[in-house]
Amino acid sequence: LQVLCRKIDRDADVSSIVAERPQAKEIAKKCSCSPLFLEVVGGFIHQRKNEKKAYESVINFLQTGEHFSGTKTYSFDESRVLFSYDGLNRNAQEAFLDICSFFYNWELEEVAWIVGEEEFECLQEGALLKNKDGRISIHDLILSAGRNKCKDSRFTTASELSKALKKEELVSQIKGVWLRQNGSPFHISAEELDVMSTSLRVFSMGNLTIVEGKCQKQFDELRYFQVDRVPNLPMDISNLKHLSYIDYAFGKDMILSSSK
């Protein structure tokens, strides 16, 4: 009960929370087997403007049990963690998936700058990530659930990305590409990147990445862009609308178009 109440309101006494919201005791009893889930549920209630409705949502969630049954994608315990994720706004959800895929164990301040400080704060309050000596720490279950959630939209290997690029319905939904250690040259066309222009948030091109052509579209969602010894920059800097981070220090032979 104390774990739950500390997340709901860190400044209030447990007794006062229970007195005002007797549902807290019921929630704590049903979730007592999982301290992690108590924190996640407490974080969910803490972030809701309508606290009464938040309690009702949690109670309904616990009574129906549909999220506890597990699915083909998520394990029994991972399904519980997604309850908090589902309560986030879209920007915070995307920030969470970016962190699980690419920025786990990075310095907090750097990641907050990349994904957005408001979204980052939301994730902390929701108990989806923590501060460990100035770096991001995520519980193994939460990390696994996040990575499973975005396995068809964020890629860290050329082989998996190649498979996705062969499926037209997936290309426009790709939100992250991080190719840092290619074993052999990997080719990606500017046309394919243009299709991703409305969804791509993270793009890191590693050694032996070959981009064919020049992008024509504006990248509306790109937050992080990094190149490593890539001979050409595939897009003009003016195409990068909401960029928080760009690093092309290693691309000494790269042609960088001037911003307009």
Image (cartoon, rainbow, N blue to C red):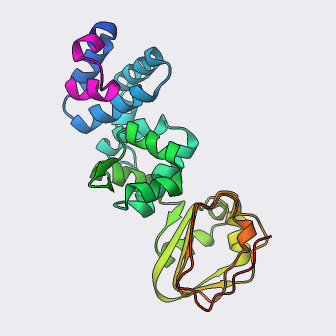
Residue 144, position as x, y percentages in the image: 35, 54
Find out whether residue 72 is within the magenta segment: no
* Residue 150 or residue 53, whichever sits in front: 53
The percent position of residue 23, horizontal first and vertical second, equals: 32, 14
Residue 6 among those drawn in magenta: yes
* 184 sits left or right of 142 in the view: right
User: Left of 167 or right of it: where is 105?
Assistant: left
Q: Which residue is found at the position 40% from the left and 30% from the top? A: 44
- In this rendering, the answer to whether 62 lies above or below 204 is above
* Quadrant assignment, res 258: bottom right
Which image quarter is the N terminus in?
top left
Q: Residue at x 33, y 11 (%)?
A: 21
> Split into 4 quadrants, where in the image is the C terminus?
bottom right
Query: Looking at the image, which residue is at 30% across and 10% down?
Result: 22
Which residue is found at the position 54% from the left and 60% from the top? 153
Depth check: give the residue in front, 11 or 22.
11
- Quadrant of the rendered structure where residue 189 is? bottom right
- On the image, the x and y values in percent for residue 146 come to 41, 52
Considering every residue shown, the one lying at the far top of the view is 19
Range drawn in magenta: 1-17
Q: Position of residue 12 (x, y in %)?
A: 29, 18
Q: Main secondary structure of the magenta part?
A: helix
On screen, 236 above or below 5? below
Q: How many marks?
A: 0
